[in-house]
Image (tube, helix red, strand yellow):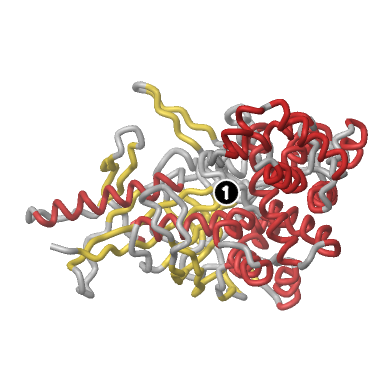
Amino acid sequence: MEYDVVIGMETHVEQSTRSKMFCSCSANFFGAEPNTNVCPTCLGMPGALPVINQRAVEFCIMVGLALNCKIARHTFWERKSYWYPDLPKGYQISQYQYPLCYDGYIDVDVRDLSSGNWTEEHYRKRIRIRRAHLEEDTGKLTHAGNSSFVDYNRSGVPLIEIVTEPDIASADEAYAYLSALRDIVRYLGVSSGDMEKGALRGEPNMSLRPKGSDTFGTKVEIKNLNSLRAVRDSIAYEIKRQSRLLDEGGQVRQVTMGWDDARGVTVTQREKEDAHDYRYFPEPDLPPLVIDDAWLEAIKARMPELPLEKNDRFMRDFGLSGYDAMVLTRDRATAEYYEKVVAALSPHAQSEKVAAKSAANWVTGELFRLMSAAGASIEDVKVTPAQLAGLIRLVDSKTININTARQVFEEMFAGGQDARAIVEAKGLAQVSDEDALSKVVEDALNANPQQVQAYLAGNEKLFQFLVGQTMKLTKGKGNPQVLQRLLKAALDKRR
């Protein structure tokens, strides 16, 4: 039987605030000694009262605006019963009835990622956002043999839970959604979005139903996925598992599953709870949260251009391909670096689109290659956008050729010097003088008589060999276009 896949996604975004959600303990717990970033409040000690982190509220509103959500102007906090030892007070402070952000949507570009290769073919999918609310994160449990250890450093860190409507219909759509969400929170500076460190955790809720049916199947949740690939692969596996089970006449149970990445299978963890199991009730130790007009407008004024908007603008205004636009806009700092290169090039280029394409080639090519080799981020790059534009202009003016430019750029990347200074100090300027190059051509032809005769006899592939010989004689500084033209003329004279 054929089945439709129905997926809703719950995502937890760990915020990059300096302090925790309801106390002044440091929220920067990664790598810290266990149980050092704690206090009576986040340890749930009797009499310790919570205080709302204003920055965490603003971060949640920024995410809500980016997801086209309505912002609740008046909401309150609730206690969610929690029976696991990684929250010592026995409950989690959250929002349920009135989330801070609700009724939104996100548009994502979906591509077939099954082959692992980029394709320009895609479709745009709108995924509705049911809610995005604030809560506190839990601690970390570590199990070793018959013992369990708990680290409360993460307990109380501000967390945004984002819940979609069941609009996702494939593993590729889930991948695209989570990838777009990660890019957004990074653009906003709300979170690192680092899934391997737990800053972004995706939890698909999925079911199958007979193709064309309007009745939902039994929902299965896959918990705490820590990579985009794990999201895609676990959903793909569950689709096959549930399809086979239904085809054999079995029934899908409502359970929470984990993903065993090493074996590539899902495993049952526990029976799934429903909302009433958490026994929500209003948090008595916190006042209601009121968002007034002035506060909301101030937050809106800080909102940057978002990744998909920037992607579309780069394609529209700069004429970039879908691939170039995607890789340049995935990271905000990279996109801003690229735009500064274009701005520095444009006054000297034939057009802004010519400047934009040239800048894209250098940023996605040589700059990304050197960054990857050095394990560097764009913030670590010593070459300023103006310096990269200066190098590109030297190539465009034929002061240096492309091979020399790549060598110069490696030195720029290592030390941050200007391209012209390196070229002048090392005498790398391209030779374009036709008299000097004509002599080089004659010397190359005289040094390779057998190849010249073979070329004249019809073996035209040897032309590139002879070009290489002229470049060798100029130590790579000869203008390739001029050399090829002079070489062709000299060979024609010998026919």
From this viewpoint, which residue is outermost toward the bottom? 293
Rendering quarter of residue 55: bottom right
Work out which quarter of the rendered image holds the C terminus and state it: top right
Q: Is residue 26 visible?
A: no
Compared across the picture, whether 279 is left or right of 134 comes to left
Which residue is found at the position 57% from the left and 58% from the top? 326
Front residue of 216/269: it is: 216
Which residue is found at the position 75% from the left and 39% from the top? 380
Q: Is residue 408 visible?
A: yes
Q: Is residue 296 above or below residue 62?
A: below
Front residue of 311/18: it is: 311
Residue 196 in the image, given as x and y percentages of width and height: 51, 39
Work out which quarter of the rendered image holds the N terminus and state it: bottom left
Rendering quarter of residue 374: top right
Please give the residue where the numbered disc 1 appears in the rendered image. 193
Which residue is found at the position 80% from the left and 36% from the top? 477
Q: Secondary structure at mark 1?
A: loop
Compared across the picture, whether 380 is left or right of 175 comes to right
From this viewpoint, which residue is outermost toward the left? 249
Residue 375 in the image, given as x and y percentages of width and height: 65, 33
Rendering quarter of residue 83: top left
Residue 136 in the image, given as x and y percentages of width and height: 55, 51
From this viewpoint, which residue is outermost toward the top? 145
The amino acid at mark 1 is Gly
